[in-house]
């Protein structure tokens, strides 16, 4: 048996509140789990990173380096993992689902392919548990500020039972319907726009850069005009930095836009802009920037125009 890390005293657990097993304490999962702690929930956390476990313990949670023990006697398993494979590993291979309470609720909050989410839901419910498809939007800033947009699909009664958890983590909660996978489709639509907007912003700023304009001034112009977008305003300044803090990596968008294209294929929907945006993220990753902040998709443009500019005649 693994020993839980020592913790600071946690807030008093409110009457009737479920015990939560939170799997995935990364840049978004850690602040999300911490918000639940501050709201009086008992939260048991798991992550493969020792630093993440220590940070969670320091915030008052009970941290385990084993998913099975983190899930012991939990009523809700919230997953904020990288992909659907990690969700399967935690729930089935590591035994988290089997070690949670009878009829516990699995809440998958990661961005995953809709069809695979539906299959995971079937596997969970076949074992007598409940499942909610609940991806989020808002990034690290939204996780830290408890202002995420949360899209939820699944059994309506289970959603209503879990609404208090979502209200702690997000400022906008959307119920998409009874069938798991529907919320993941909505998240794919969101990621399509995010990815295309981000690549468009990189293209615009690379043009200004290549033309010799002061890019900070150009960024100020477009950020305050009809050309502005949330992604431009959030990522634009970081595009101009050589090595900005990573809030979401290039490779995350390689994954997410791959999910978008798979959703389009399933729906027989043509997505040419998403396809082009995906290629730019793949190019940036292939150039060695996969772990860099996703704003650094601009490096793909710089790579295309590397070298000396021709002298003007």
Image (cartoon, grey):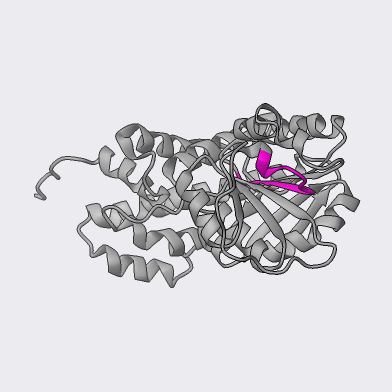
Pick the front one: 274 or 186: 186
Residue 148 image-quadrant placement: bottom right
Residue 255: x, y in percent? 52, 36
* Residue occupying the far right of the picture: 157
Residue at the (62%, 36%) spot, across then down: 1
Q: Which residues are magenta?
A: 69-80
Q: Residue at (61%, 57%) from the top-left corner? A: 61
In the picture, residue 154 is in which quadrant?
A: top right
x 45%, y 39%: residue: 251
Q: Provide residue 12's location: percent of width, then percent of height.
A: 72, 69
211 horizontally vs 65: left or right: left
Q: Which one is nearer the viewer's eye here, 162 or 268?
A: 162
Q: Is residue 10 above or below residue 74?
A: below
Residue 164 can be seen in this image = yes
- Relative horizontal placement of residue 66, taking residue 161 as reference (left or right): left
Check residue 78 for magenta coloring. yes
Residue 35 colored in magenta in the image: no
Q: Is residue 163 left or right of residue 234?
A: right
* Residue 40 to residue 273: above or below: below
């Amino acid at each position: 048996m693994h020993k839980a890390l020592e913790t600071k005293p946690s807030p008093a657990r409110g009457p009737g509140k479920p015990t939560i097993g939170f799997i995935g304490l990364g840049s978004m999962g850690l602040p999300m789990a911490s918000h639940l702690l501050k709201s009086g929930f008992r939260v048991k956390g798991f992550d493969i990173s020792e630093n993440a476990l220590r940070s969670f313990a320091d915030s008052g949670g009970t941290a385990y380096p084993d998913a099975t023990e983190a899930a012991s006697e939990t009523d809700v398993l919230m997953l904020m993992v990288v992909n659907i494979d990690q969700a399967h590993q935690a729930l089935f291979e590591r035994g988290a689902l089997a070690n949670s309470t009878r009829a516990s609720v699995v809440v998958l909050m990661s961005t995953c392919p809709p069809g695979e989410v539906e299959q995971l839901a079937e596997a969970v419910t076949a074992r007598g548990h409940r499942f909610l498809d609940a991806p989020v939007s808002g990034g690290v800033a939204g996780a830290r500020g408890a202002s995420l947009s949360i899209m939820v699909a699944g059994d309506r009664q289970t959603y209503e039972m879990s609404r208090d958890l979502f209200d702690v983590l997000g400022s906008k909660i959307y119920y998409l319907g009874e069938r798991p996978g529907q919320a993941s489709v909505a998240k794919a639509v969101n990621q399509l726009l995010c990815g295309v907007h981000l690549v468009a912003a990189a293209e615009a700023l690379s043009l200004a850069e290549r033309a010799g304009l002061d890019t900070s001034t150009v960024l100020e112009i477009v950020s305050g005009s009809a050309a502005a977008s949330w992604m431009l305003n959030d990522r634009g300044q970081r595009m101009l930095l050589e090595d900005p803090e990573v809030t979401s990596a290039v490779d995350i968008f390689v994954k997410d836009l791959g999910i978008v294209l798979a959703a389009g294929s399933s729906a027989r929907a043509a997505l040419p802009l998403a396809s082009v945006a995906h290629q730019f993220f793949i190019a940036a990753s292939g150039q060695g920037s996969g772990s860099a902040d996703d704003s650094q998709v601009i490096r793909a443009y710089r790579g295309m125009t590397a070298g000396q500019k021709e002298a003007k005649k």
